Image: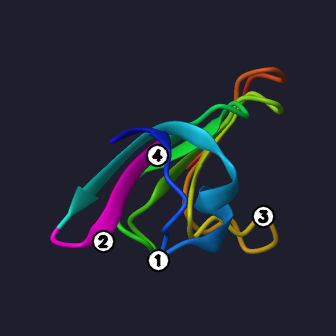
């Protein structure tokens, strides 16, 4: 689904942006937003998040303190799995 999608029941923050959005069985499966961010995967631990502002890719369960999940920092060359 492309364009301004303003009827989000699953993620209110998506409603404020335009971009490319996809759904699977009524749940948001991916979003690539016009602000340079996006994600792929279901909500929760399986989601991969893209942050174009910081040049980072990380899993939704990333916690820097206990090093759980996945984190890639493309600007600084840091890769942690």
Magenta residues, dominant SS class: strand
Of mark 3 and mark 4, the one earlier in the sequence is 4
Which span of residues is magenta-colored? Answer: 25-31
The numbered disc on residue 64 is: 3
Q: Secondary structure at mark 3?
A: loop
Q: CA distance from mark 4 to mark 1?
A: 12 Å
Q: Secondary structure at mark 2?
A: strand
Contact (CB < 8 A) between labels 4 and 1?
no
Of mark 1 and mark 2, the one earlier in the sequence is 1
Q: CA distance from mark 2 to mark 4?
A: 11 Å
Instruction: Indicate the position of residue 65 as horizontal and vertical percent values.
Output: 82, 71
Residue assigned mark 4: 31
Q: As displayed, is residue 47 above or below residue 48?
A: below
Q: As displayed, is residue 43 above or below residue 3?
A: below
Q: CA distance from mark 1 to mark 2?
A: 7 Å
State which quarter of the image contains the N terminus: top left
Q: CA distance from mark 2 to mark 3?
A: 28 Å
Query: Does residue 79 show up?
Result: no
Q: As displayed, is residue 3 above or below residue 11?
A: above
Question: Left or right of 81: which side holds 2?
Answer: left
* Residue 27 inside the magenta-drawn segment: yes
């Amino acid at each position: 689904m492309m364009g301004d999608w303003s009827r989000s029941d699953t993620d209110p923050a998506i409603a404020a942006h335009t971009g490319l959005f996809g759904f699977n069985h009524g749940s948001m499966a991916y979003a690539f937003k016009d602000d340079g961010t996006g994600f792929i995967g279901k909500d929760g631990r399986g989601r991969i998040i893209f942050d174009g502002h910081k040049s980072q890719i990380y899993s939704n369960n990333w916690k820097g303190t206990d090093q759980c999940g996945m984190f890639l920092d493309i600007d600084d060359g840091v890769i942690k799995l």
